[in-house]
Image (spheres, grey):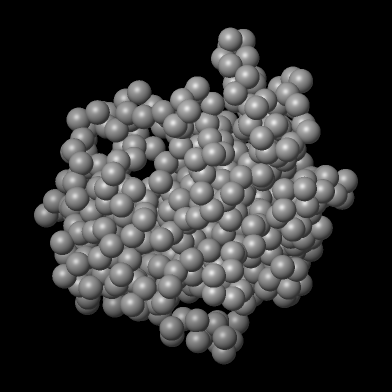
């Protein structure tokens, strides 16, 4: 432990979601490729692995829209591990084999669940550890919700029979008696995910790598979260949304972002001592070592839009719970290792909340080069209590971003960058798009932030075709995958850069 007054060590990490790992099953899994990536991080001197929410995704494939915010994604369960456990035959694994390339969620939906059901057919539900998992009850609402959703042809819960939509206790008990196998299948996938994730996390810890996870501010409407707790959200009497979440026009979108998530009734949450949130945070820290809170500004003021609106332009700002929530959580759980995602529309209220909380904020170097000397993302304006990124999952890759700039803007950027590199003592000089991207990555490592995180795309200097997400769009997002784990030579170069930046 560090002594009182002693600075925390400056560290570095890599942003790569599990889905983006290479492998033979169409999407990254928690198996050997994940362990090989941990080995790469350890060899490079990277102490953190940042992932996106690990949740089960639904329509649109976004990890920020899940059927249950506390779930693990069944797609990430490693078939090879199931085979080692005797739940699958090696000859059956080929049904999920998929040539290297972008994630095909349609293929996965058709094949992966069929494979998991086959594994479940051989699983002993009387196993003591599974019985304990079931009796603990954390996934009861989720498994019941998924069984009901399956019985209703995967329709949203607002289209279910009234007795199920409004959670009539007798109807639910009768349904559970008649559909126990389906209920336990969904418990099984969460049980297997939890076991495989814990094994991977322990593997990372043994190699000095800690996991940075992601907690979305909002949950999806069509989710066990809302179905089981409708009083905590601004819904109509028929349980449809009355108000939905989003953000006003900003850097990413001229018409704002209309997310569609139901917004919280914060008055009710406060009356209940924020119990639902405390449980949600407890779950997050059981999965991760550090948690990035997505859209932190929403805890100060949040933007709500009338359900049915076509854009987010006509929304209104409302007061959030502020420090009341975080004080309640820390009284219950102790000091929390949060990162506050404070990007987008920021005002003095958000700044005060971040200062009061003490949580590190985020700095993105891709936003630093507008020519404003007071730009908050310039290295001189970045303090220690922060996490610096070249970009996030919502940004283009550095190479993609630089390649998209008109000539005059690219020249302005390199004109700003060159003196910053000199001030930081970095020998790298911009001499083309890739060398400029490499220089910005080196600059990110040099800043005062306690933690610097590089998306793997910016380490590999890959282009816009490897971008993870374009906000306010659908159809092409969340599909990026590595072709292979970065090489030992890449790890050596990174380690040298970290040593030079004082992050080893």
The quadrant in which residue 440 appears is: top right
Picture coordinates of residue 332, whole percent (x, y): 35, 78
Q: Residue at x 78, y 52 (%)?
A: 499
Q: Residue at x 33, y 77 (%)?
A: 331
Instruction: Describe residue 413's horizontal placement relative to residue 163 as left or right.
Output: right
Identity of the residue furthest to the left in this view: 237
Question: Of 393 and 159, which appears nearest the observer?
Answer: 393
Count of marks placed on residues: 0
Question: Of 89 and 85, which appears nearest the observer?
Answer: 85
Question: Of 141 and 64, which appears nearest the observer?
Answer: 64
Q: Residue at x 56, y 32 (%)?
A: 366
Q: Does residue 418 show up?
A: yes
Identity of the residue furthest to the bottom in this view: 128
Picture coordinates of residue 34, whole percent (x, y): 72, 58
Q: Quadrant of the N terminus?
A: bottom right
Q: Is residue 322 above or below residue 344?
A: below
Q: Quadrant of the C terminus?
A: bottom right
Instruction: Describe residue 245's horizontal placement relative to residue 478 as left or right.
Output: left
Question: Of 372 and 208, which appears nearest the observer?
Answer: 372
Q: Does residue 163 show up?
A: no
Q: Is residue 203 above or below residue 235?
A: below
The quadrant in which residue 139 appears is: bottom left
Q: Residue at x 69, y 64 (%)?
A: 209
Picture coordinates of residue 4, whole percent (x, y): 54, 75
Picture coordinates of residue 10, whole percent (x, y): 64, 57
Q: Is residue 265 above or below residue 438?
A: below
Instruction: Describe residue 347's horizontal placement relative to residue 10 as left or right.
Output: left
The quadrant in which residue 464 appears is: top right
């Amino acid at each position: 432990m560090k002594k009182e007054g002693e600075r925390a060590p400056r560290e570095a990490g890599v942003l790569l979601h599990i889905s983006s790992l290479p492998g033979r099953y169409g999407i990254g899994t928690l198996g050997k490729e994940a362990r090989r990536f941990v080995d790469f991080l350890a060899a490079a001197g990277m102490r953190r692995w940042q992932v996106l929410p690990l949740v089960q995704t639904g329509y649109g494939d976004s990890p920020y829209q899940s059927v249950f915010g506390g779930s693990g994604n069944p797609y990430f369960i490693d078939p090879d591990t199931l085979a080692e456990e005797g739940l699958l035959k090696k000859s059956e694994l080929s049904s999920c084999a998929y040539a290297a390339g972008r994630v095909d969620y349609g293929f996965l939906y058709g094949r992966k669940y069929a494979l998991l059901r086959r594994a479940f057919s051989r699983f002993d539900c009387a196993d003591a550890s599974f019985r304990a998992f079931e009796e603990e009850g954390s996934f009861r609402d989720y498994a019941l919700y998924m069984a009901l959703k399956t019985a209703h042809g995967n329709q949203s819960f607002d289209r279910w029979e009234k007795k199920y939509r409004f959670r009539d206790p007798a109807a639910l008990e009768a349904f559970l008696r008649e559909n126990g196998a389906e209920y336990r299948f969904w418990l099984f996938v969460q049980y297997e995910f939890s076991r495989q994730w814990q094994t991977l996390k322990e593997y990372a810890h043994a190699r000095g790598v800690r996991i940075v996870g992601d907690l979305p501010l909002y949950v999806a409407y069509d989710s066990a979260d809302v179905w089981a707790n409708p009083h905590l959200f601004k819904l109509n009497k028929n349980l449809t949304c009355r108000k939905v979440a989003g953000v006003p026009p900003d850097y990413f979108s001229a018409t704002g972002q209309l997310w569609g998530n139901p917004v919280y009734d914060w008055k009710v949450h406060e009356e209940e001592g924020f119990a639902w949130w405390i449980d949600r945070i407890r779950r997050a820290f059981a999965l991760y070592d550090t948690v990035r809170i997505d859209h932190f500004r929403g805890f100060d003021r949040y933007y709500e839009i009338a359900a049915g609106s076509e854009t987010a332009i006509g929304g209104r700002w409302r007061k959030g719970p502020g420090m009341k929530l975080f004080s309640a959580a820390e009284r219950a759980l102790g000091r929390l290792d949060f990162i506050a995602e404070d990007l987008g529309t920021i005002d003095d209220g958000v700044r005060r909340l971040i200062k009061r909380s003490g949580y590190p904020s985020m700095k993105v170097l891709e936003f630093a080069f507008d020519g404003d000397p007071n730009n908050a993302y310039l290295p001189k304006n970045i303090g220690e209590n922060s996490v610096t990124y070249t970009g996030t999952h919502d940004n283009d890759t550095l190479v993609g971003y630089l390649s998209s700039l008109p000539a005059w803007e690219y020249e302005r950027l390199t004109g700003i960058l060159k003196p910053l590199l000199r001030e930081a003592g970095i020998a790298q000089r911009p001499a083309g798009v890739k060398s400029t991207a490499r220089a910005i990555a080196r600059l990110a490592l040099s800043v005062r932030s306690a933690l610097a995180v590089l998306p793997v795309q910016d380490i590999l200097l890959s282009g816009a075709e490897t971008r993870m997400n374009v906000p306010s769009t659908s159809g092409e997002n969340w599909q990026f995958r590595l072709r292979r784990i970065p090489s030992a030579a890449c790890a050596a170069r990174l380690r040298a850069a970290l040593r030079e930046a004082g992050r080893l």
